[in-house]
Every structure is written in C-alpha cells, then in structure tokens.
Amino acid sequence: MVFANPTYLYLLLLLIPLIGWYIWKLRKSQASLQVSSSQPFDLPGGNSFKVYLRHVPFVLRMLAIALLIVVLARPQSTNSWQNSSTEGIDIMLAMDISGSMLAQDLRPNRLEAAKDVAASFINGRPNDNIGLVVFSGESFTQCPLTTDHTVLLNLFKDIHSGMIEDGTAIGLGLANAVSRIKDSQAISKVIILLTDGSNNMGEIAPVTAAEIAKTFGIRVYTIGVGTRGEAPYPFQTAFGIQYQNVKVDIDEPTLKQIAATTGGQYFRATDNASLKAIYSEIDKMEKTKISVQEFSKKQEEYKHWAIFILALLLVEILLRNTLLRNIP
C-alpha cells in the first residue's frame, strides 16, 4: 500500500486536540451533588453496560475522521515490480564426440562426463541463450541458440559417438559455432569448445577459426579433456569389448592459442571433479548484468475506505438515536 499524497497523513495529528476536548467537555458537563451517602444510588449489579458504551459514538466518529484523512492521502495498491538486473549472455557449446571420447579416464567415459557437467551448467544459467554444436570428422548444429533449455537438454541425451564420421575437426567445429552465434545481438558472446585430441580433419584450421571468432567479438574458452599419460579405451574384438591403454594426445598449444586469440582461457580436465570445477569457473567469469526496466501498475483503493467510513457513521448515528440516546 502506498499513498499518492502522503503529506495529508499529518492531519491525523488533529485527532489529539479533538480527543483532549472530548475529555475536558465530559468532565465539565458532569454535575456534583453532596450527599451523606451514595449507597442508595448504587445499582445492584454495578454500573450499567451503557455507562461503558457511552464513549462508543465518539470513538466511531474519531475513526471516521481518521479514515477520511487516509482517503485524502489517496491510498493505492501496487504490484511488487521494480527496476532490476538479470544475468544473461549467449553461449554456444562446441563438443567433441569423436571415438576417443569413449576413453574411461573420466567416468563413465569422457563423453558422458562432459554431457553431465554441461547439463548442470545449462541448468544453472536460466537467463542465457545456449546452443550446441557437435563435431568429430565433420560438424553440425545439434541445437541453435535457445532459452528453451528443456529442448536443449533433451537433444543432449541423443548425443553419442559415431553419429557422424569419426575424426577430430576442431577448426570446423569452432567455425560452425561461430556461424551460429556471430549474428547475436548480445553484448557478451561466448563459445565453450571441448575436445580430447588434435585437429586431424576439416578444411578450416583451428587458429583460422579463432581469428574469425575474434573478428565477431566472440570469446572462446577451450577445454582439453583427458588424463596425462595413458587412458583405458574400449576396443571391439571377437571376444567382446576389450580395454587397452592408449596415449592421451591433446594439442594443448593450439587450444591455448585459440583461447588467447579470442580473449578466453584454456583449461585442462583430467577427471570428473576438475571438469566440473572448470565449468563452475567459467560460470563465475561470465556474468553480464542486464538492466531490466519494469513498470508498476497502481490502482486507487479509496473506495473501500470510503465505504468503511460510511459504515462507521451509520453505526454512530444508529447508536446515538437508539441504544445510547441522551435525554435532555
């Protein structure tokens, strides 16, 4: 509740002299009579209830005056809208889905670990436009930029290694992500590129794609996924799935150069915990405040108060002329 003319509320101070005048008049109007004993005048059951109710009309009158002053101050109801700020940027996720992402140095494997952590990242940023590009030997857009994160997360579930030709086309994946976000009107545009290998396919070099991203003001965070040394990788044999340790080969110099060129940062995830920590750090760094102007709708509420005033006056008049009537 707010008031359009709050200065009128100072008129409530007038009630103080009115109450003082009523008390003074009440004392002055009472006559005194000297008698030897007041016992014959005492009522059997004590004072009549009318003695206690005789002040009710005055109380009702004071309440009516107080509410009339409130009406003059124009009470208004308003929605709890206000100027606020929210956080929102445009983010494209570029994820490697090549066969090497099935290595189990992360649990249950690199790809599933990357999907789980990315899903948590998406859930933690409800105000962002987020899209998804996948790549291996080639690249395609799994989901364009959207605020409908339910759809995006459902599409995440469909990602699996072998969807497209195997290989690692980092430059092509990055270029695809750039093409999807370059026309965004957002102040901050970010690509998070995750891979576990070295560029060995595609017509676009990773550094060239980074230069294109820089031209459009896109910041790229690169993540190298894989332990240091060797990692267990599943091979299909005549006797079923067999695991063999293979060398982890991540082109860290190129990933670092991509990040440096675009003003981003390179991270290395050697296990599930470090991968989760990386996404948490990116989440903290990418917080762009957007001012939102919200307008408040006000509605006059004096009618309810006016009806209450009328009811008080009617009750006062009724009591003065019936139950609490004074006989001269």
Image (cartoon, helix red, strand yellow):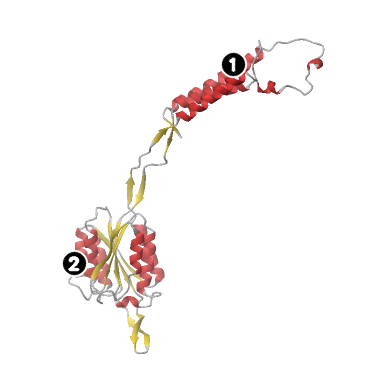
In three-dimensional space, the C-alpha distance between marks 2 and 1, rounded to whole angstroms, equals 91 Å
**Neighbour tally class for label 2: few under 14, some 14-19, many 20 plus, Cα within 10 Å:** some
- The quadrant in which residue 227 appears is bottom left
* Residue at the extreme bottom of the image, as rendered: 238
Under mark 1, the amino acid is Trp
Q: Please name whichever residue, 274 or 157, is drawn nearer the observer in this view of the structure.
A: 157
Q: Is residue 93 above or below residue 313?
A: below
**Neighbour tally class for label 1: few under 14, some 14-19, many 20 plus, Cα within 10 Å:** few
Q: Is residue 286 above or below residue 103?
A: above
Direction from residue 178 to residue 226 in the image, left or right: right
**Which residue: 81% across, 17% down?**
39
Disc count in the image?
Answer: 2
Q: Are marks 2 and 1 in contact (CB under 8 Å)?
A: no
Name the spot of residue 152 as percent of width and height, x first: 33, 62
- The quadrant in which residue 22 appears is top right
Under mark 2, the amino acid is Thr
**Disc nearer the start of the sequence (2/1):** 1
> In which quadrant is the C terminus drawn?
top right
Circle 2 is placed at which residue position? Answer: 208
Is residue 257 visible from the viewing direction of this image?
no
Local secondary structure at mark 2: helix
Q: Is residue 19 above or below residue 183?
A: above
Name the spot of residue 203 as percent of width and height, x first: 17, 72
**Which residue: 18% across, 67% down?**
208
Circle 1 is placed at which residue position? Answer: 21
Direction from residue 42 to residue 188 in the image, left or right: left
**Which residue: 52% across, 22% down?**
65
Name the spot of residue 59 as percent of width and height, x first: 59, 23
Q: Please name whichever residue, 291 or 52, is drawn nearer the observer in this view of the structure.
A: 52
